[in-house]
Amino acid sequence: MHHPDPAAPDPAPHRAAGPAAARPRPTSRDVARAAGVSQATVSLVLGDKWRGRVSERTARLVRDAADELGYRPNLAARNLRLGRTRTALLVVPALTNEFFARVYTGAATVAAEHGFGVVLYPSPQGVGPAKDPFASARAALDGVIASSMAADALRAIRGTDLPLVMLDSDPADTGAAAYVNLDVGDGMRQVTGHLLALGHRRFAHLSSAVPSWTFDVRARALAACLRGVPEVTVRTVPAPLDVSGARAAAEAALSAPGPRPTALVCDDDIVAAGACKAVRRLGLRVPEDVSVTGFDDLALATAVEPELTTVRLPAERIGERGMAALLDVLSGRPPESGDLPVTLVPRGSSGPARAR
């Protein structure tokens, strides 16, 4: 790990959110004044270079003063200016989801080709605020890549001067240096067209209960495709991103008063797996009675029976493009633009709608 040079200038003050926004972040000068030592001594102690140069008593005074003031050196910002770390941080909503593992694989492959490393950092569910990764990981970084994150989850990262590349995120949010997106809206249009061609007119959308731009785009695309189609009905039911929660949501959608939906459109494959279980628990069949579609094309999509009709997302490719975009930003080059295409993969979980 790189430690700050004793002669290095303090990083720019960080403004805290909320009522204390006007209070500047404590500086090494404040710590030096509180401990009665020089700024160089503060840098030595907090950079863990004090042994043999500063007494243990003085080191303890500096650490106690820093703790009391809430001071933390901005190692990441310092190292960014020096350009020495060759390390990027990849922030994802979950480590257990195969999609993000594949995003990491793509990013790490491109990073290795350029002598970079990638540190993986989870922010559970992608909803904020995430903890400041520099406080917990203590990593010195050149930049950050954030995949499928809610806007509020990135406040801590945006409080630094690190370049931020956002994947599968709202391009209208101007807080990033670059965006790399999948054409998820087109993916939902492909799903909807497929089901309409099979004669389906009664839909239930099992929408992700996690607030995220990527799921909002899917919902808007589905609504736009079905708007104005004769005799179409759509029921939207929020679903957790786990099999048991999705099963319960699907059972509610299928058991609600009124004509039963003939197609369950799910925001991801995990939700779709839960939906398939719900269909069977109600004594129905997939796809003879109810068609089910997913999104992502995880390994799970071909592990269930019947196999899932779903949208294949090039997860490794978005990781590759994200890392390439960060390298471009660090080098002062314009990143590659344009959304990555996605592909509908029809399988056994979708079939013709039953005659009324």
Image (tube, rainbow, N blue to C red):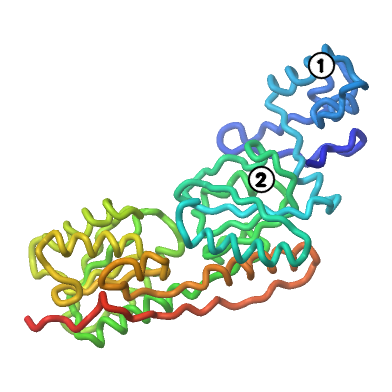
- Is 73 on the left or on the right of 98, as rendered? right
**Residue occupying image coordinates x 86% and y 50%:** 82
**Residue occupying image coordinates x 33% and y 77%:** 224
Task: Read off the residue under disc 1.
Answer: 35
Quadrant of the rendering where the C terminus is positioned: bottom left
**Residue occupying image coordinates x 70% and y 72%:** 335
Residue 219 appears in the rendering:
no
- Tell me the quarter of the picture where residue 246 sits: bottom left
Q: Position of residue 73 (x, y in %)?
A: 76, 35
Q: Is residue 14 above or below residue 229?
A: above
Q: Residue furthest bottom?
A: 197
Q: Position of residue 125 (x, y in %)?
A: 45, 49
- The residue closer to the viewer here, 225 or 280, is 280
Q: Is residue 297 above or below residue 282?
A: below
- The residue closer to the viewer here, 286 or 24, is 286
Q: Earlier in the sequence, mark 1 or mark 2?
A: 1
- The Cα atoms of the two marked residues, 1 and 2, are separated by 27 Å
- The residue closer to the viewer here, 263 or 171, is 263
- Tell me the quarter of the picture where residue 334 sits: bottom right
- Is 48 on the left or on the right of 270, as rendered? right
Task: Read off the residue under disc 2.
Answer: 159
Q: Position of residue 31 (x, y in %)?
A: 79, 23
Callout 1: SS: helix
Q: Is residue 312 above or below residue 256?
A: below
* Number of other residues with Cα within 10 Å of mark 1, as a class: few under 14, some 14 to 19, many 20 or more: many
Which residue type carries mark 2? Gly
- Is 303 on the left or on the right of 129, as rendered? left
Which residue type carries mark 1? Ala
Q: Residue furthest top?
A: 57
